[in-house]
Amino acid sequence: MCGIIGLMAKKEELRQSLGELVLPMFDCMAERGPDSAGLAVFAAAVEPPLRRFSLFSERHGYDWSGLAGSLETDLDCRADVVTRDNHAEVIAPLEVDRLRQWLKQRGNGVRVLSVGNSIEVFKDVGRPDEVARRYEFSALRGTHCVGHTRMATESQVSPAHAHPFTAGEDFCLVHNGSLSNPYSLRRLLEEENLEFETDNDSEAACRFLQWRMRKGDTIEQALGSAFEKIDGFYTFLIGTANQMVLVRDPFACKPAVVAETDQYVAISSEFRSLAHLPGVSEANIFEPLPEQIYVWRVAA
Amino acid sequence: MKTVRLDLSTTSVREVNDYLHHQLVTEGVRVVEILHPNGMHNIAVGLDCPIEAHVRGNAGYFIGGMNKQAHITVYGNVGWSVAENIMSGSVRVKGNASECTAASGHGGLVVIEGDSSSRCGISMKGCDIVVGGSVGHMSGFMAQAGNLVVCGDAGAHLGDSLYEAVIYVRGKIHSLGADAREEPMMEADYVKIGELLKRAGFELPPKEFKRVASARTLYHWNAEAHQEY
């Protein structure tokens, strides 16, 4: 199964309570994906050269302030750190490769979950409602968020295999479904010197799309080429710094429901996780058509 | 007539269904009001008694599944597989339905007043379905018996691999599936549509409908077709 959710707030006051609104959506989708969960939230962009780095350590009680201290000393920059359980967000004026290189040497197994000016990613194993509370999703603020509850079918249950997957900067994908040709996608991308963190099929889709966009495609063009190259069942929900994008496979095998009002766009695998939203009874509710690309942009 | 109210905000679906299956008949209840469904799954499945059930709100997957005798009305939208495997009685949805409406339904009447999404009437085996709006892609896929009446448009691949079910469409047909073909309307078709529309409560002229049925070229294996149908 798996559950996907997405919420884009169109008005400033909803952006301040994005986490509170999304939490019941998340809890409700726990039944569709009880083994792990994740959420990407897009908040106010930090000014370059600053970047947001979401980091994860499998060790509980990891010494994040120690890590930040060594990072500041070794790389000679200021690093602001906010920690939540196994997760830390570091905001620092660093090149991505430089931080990754440093983490390899000094990070004691700390992994990078996401990089960008706006994106922050949380993901871990456990019941989605517990994960949501452990990482204080209800306190999150931002313009939009993309989340997932996982019922693993094709690769192991681990924090790294949880969704969202990220590639490049300010780009993430969640997936409900299963792909039948992830290995041919991987071979294609490995020839382009792309590296993978897991053997998960959704990671292959995420990297494929972001690779197409790095080559100059718009998201619509990248998805057009995904229709040709990616075989299998999917509802993909993609988050970028200023967009939320939804697409279903040519048979629309996996569910999705959209509810849109002048206040928000909410997406879920099932209506029941939208039922609590304010004004949902007056919302424009529809099911996305197969192979149609739906794009919502953040209003200024 | 004795009416009972069941509130899903305070009672679980399992308890509600248990009541509908066992206690209801012994208490002589004829009308049931089900409140706060909030998109929950499996509401009022497996009913087997001649009652009216009114579901006040949006329901999730499988509502009214396997229904016998009961007349269920949903005052909202429904999720996948409403009235799946319906045997008799009726299920009416005032709003829209998601995928696989009345999948595999054997008998009875299913009315969707709004739109019904993809695979409406998939593998239906004798029930009647009337959709006030449009149906999505691959509707009527492998439908074996019964009638699917669509007052709006039909999506891609309508009636793919049809058996003996008949599909009537008033609006545009995006495309026909393999082995489905449009056929001339006969007097019996107009009579049948007229009856179904009346039972469903839609006032539309039967003359505006087209008939889609099986060309029966897939009934027997043809080794010379090279899998090209």
Image (cartoon, rainbow, N blue to C red):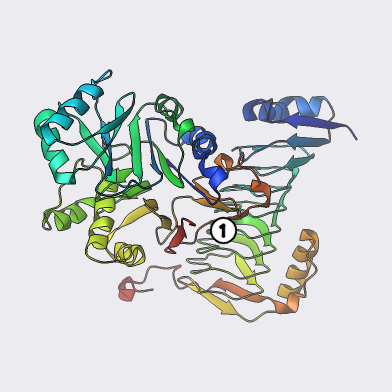
Compared with residue A158, is residue B68 higher up or lower down, i.e. above or below? Answer: below
Of residues B162 and A150, the one nearer the viewer is A150
Determine if residue B21 is in view: yes
Compared with residue A203, is residue B129 higher up or lower down, i.e. above or below? Answer: below
- Residue under label 1: B117
Residue drawn at (54%, 47%) of the image:
A12
Chain containing the residue with disc 1: B
User: What x and y, as percent, mark residue A108?
Assistant: 15, 26
Residue drawn at (57%, 72%) of the image:
B213
Compared with residue B52, is residue B210 higher up or lower down, i.e. above or below? Answer: below
Residue drawn at (64%, 27%) of the image:
B12
User: What x and y, as percent, mark residue A101?
Assistant: 11, 39
Disc 1 residue type (three-letter) = Ser
> Which residue is at the far right?
B1
Compared with residue A288, is residue A122 higher up or lower down, i.e. above or below? Answer: above
Regarding mark 1 in the picture, which secondary structure is present there?
A: loop
Of residues A19 and B94, the one nearer the viewer is A19
Label 1: few (<14), some or many (≥20) within 10 Å?
Answer: many
